[in-house]
Image (spheres, rainbow, N blue to C red):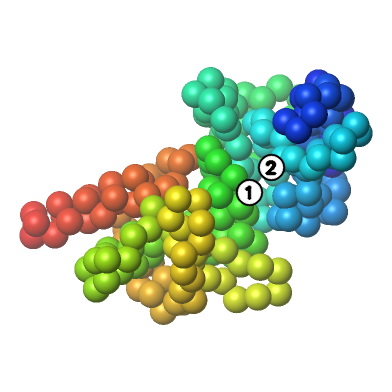
Amino acid sequence: MASDKYELVRCPECGTESDALILDKINTAVDPSMKEMVRTGDAFLFNCPNCGKKFHLEYPFMYHDPDRKVIIYYVISDEDYKDASRTIGRIQSGAVEGDEEDFEGYTFRIVRNRHEFLEKFNIFEADLDDRLVELQKLLMGAYIQKSNPDFAFDNIYYFQDKGQEGVFVLVKDGEDKASIAFDRSMYDQCAADFAASYKDEHSFVIDTNWAFRIFRILQQKKDEL
């Protein structure tokens, strides 16, 4: 289920303005069909009634999966980020009036683009810990750069198509350049090596910068021994 909210949008092809349904609060327990629509991107697809152009709408939203105890905030501005952070703070402190839902044990995340959102979606659907996945990506990226320095990539994303095994996709300038099968043994090793380094860490943004910070913390502890 999503809130019934409409906003005027302009078609990038013909310039026609039309009312579009804005799904700013998505709850997959209330409407399970939304999960597949979110996965494919159809939930945010708009079809211009004038020229038939299909395009994705860009706006902040909250994705809530009560079954997996996950809430992901998709933000597109610094103000959106501040609003999401404040909302999460109020939820965690029990200060959200009129909300009787129990958020004990929930995972809260904030993402800033579609790639990050879909990656989080896939990670949680696969029952994985996104913190371990980020650390695994960091180590894997370092290995690729060392073993194949001529291979250029900007980002690594975890992806899992429905009914398929998970893979890491290496992206350069917005294009997929290569894919590597998800290595469960490496994931488990990251848990053994790094879990103690972030056990008291409660960031809402889990990305490459976060992984670098955790890696430095572990390195500092090793240097102190």
Q: Which residue lies furthest to the bottom in this view?
A: 185
- Is 151 on the left-hand or right-hand side of 63? left
Tell which circle, 2 or 1, labels the residue nearer the N-terminal end.
2
Q: Quadrant of the N terminus?
A: top right
Amino acid type for the residue under numbered disc 1: Val
Q: Please report contact status of discs 2 and 1: CB closer than 8 Å, yes or no.
A: yes
Amino acid type for the residue under numbered disc 2: Tyr
- Is 97 on the left-hand or right-hand side of 207? right
Badge 1 element:
strand
Nearer to us in this view, 64 or 90: 64
Characterize the local packing of mark 2: few (<14), some (14-19) or many (20 or more) Cα atoms within 10 angstroms: many
Residue located 72% across and 40% down the image: 56
* Residue 200: x %, y % from top left: 36, 46
* Residue 141: x %, y % from top left: 33, 63
Question: Which numbered marker is on residue 207?
Answer: none
Can I make out residue 92 in this image? yes
- Structural distance between the alpha carbons of marks 2 and 1: 8 Å
Nearer to us in this view, 35 or 85: 35
Residue marked by disc 2: 63
Badge 2 element:
strand
* Residue 217: x %, y % from top left: 22, 50
Residue marked by disc 1: 70
Locate residue 50: give its quadrant: top right
Residue located 8% across and 54% down the image: 224
Residue located 34% across and 45% down the image: 209
Q: Residue furthest right?
A: 49
Characterize the local packing of mark 1: few (<14), some (14-19) or many (20 or more) Cα atoms within 10 angstroms: some
